[in-house]
Image: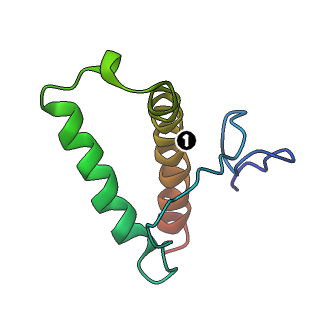
Amino acid sequence: MLNKSRPGESPGTSGIKKLNFKRGNKMSNMSYCRFQNTLHDLQDCFNEMEENFDFSELSSDEKSAFKSLIELCKDVSNMGTEILDEQRDTK
């Protein structure tokens, strides 16, 4: 069973409060393609990190978002593993 979160925390996080970043002009993810769109965006971030990435050149907001993204990726990985394990157990 997945861990329950406390109020103000994202489900499955290790104490990280849910973040509400402004998306600007970017469209929100539709439920039918949320993971596909997010995968594309995350791959773009990963590619940028592989190529001449300089953390010191980020704005303070981007540095904060970078750190939060890393923590969220850990939580997504842990929760995803739990979900896939539960899925395998039900087959």
Q: Is mark 1 on a helix, strand or loop?
A: helix
Q: Dot 1: few (<14), some (14–19), or many (≥20) neighbours within 10 Å?
A: some
Q: Which residue is drawn at 76% across and 45% down?
A: 9
Q: Position of residue 80 (x, y in %)?
A: 49, 54
Q: Which residue reaches farthest right? A: 7
Q: Which residue is drawn at 66% across and 41% down?
A: 13
Numbered circles on residues, count: 1
Q: Which quadrant is the N terminus positioned in?
A: bottom right
Q: Which residue reaches farthest left? A: 51
Q: Which residue reaches farthest top? A: 56
Q: Residue at x 51, y 32 (%)?
A: 61
User: In the picture shown, does residue 88 fall above or below 12?
Assistant: below
Q: In this view, does 53 lie to the left or right of 61?
A: left
Of residues 63 and 70, which is closer to you in this image?
63
The colour scheme is: rainbow
Q: In which quarter of the image is residue 6?
A: top right
Q: In this view, does 13 lie to the left or right of 69?
A: right
Q: In which quarter of the image is residue 53?
A: top left
User: In the picture shown, does residue 83 fall above or below 46?
Assistant: below
Q: Is residue 19 left or right of residue 55?
A: right
Amino acid type at image mark 1: Asp
User: In the picture shown, does residue 57 fall above or below 84?
Assistant: above
Q: In this view, does 11 lie to the left or right of 26?
A: right
Q: Residue at x 49, y 24 (%)?
A: 60
Q: Where is residue 28 in the image (x, y as percent from the top left)?
A: 51, 72
Q: Position of residue 91 (x, y in %)?
A: 48, 75
Where is mark 1, residue-wise?
75
Q: Which residue reaches farthest bottom? A: 32
Of residues 78 and 19, which is closer to you in this image?
19
Q: Position of residue 71 (x, y in %)?
A: 52, 33
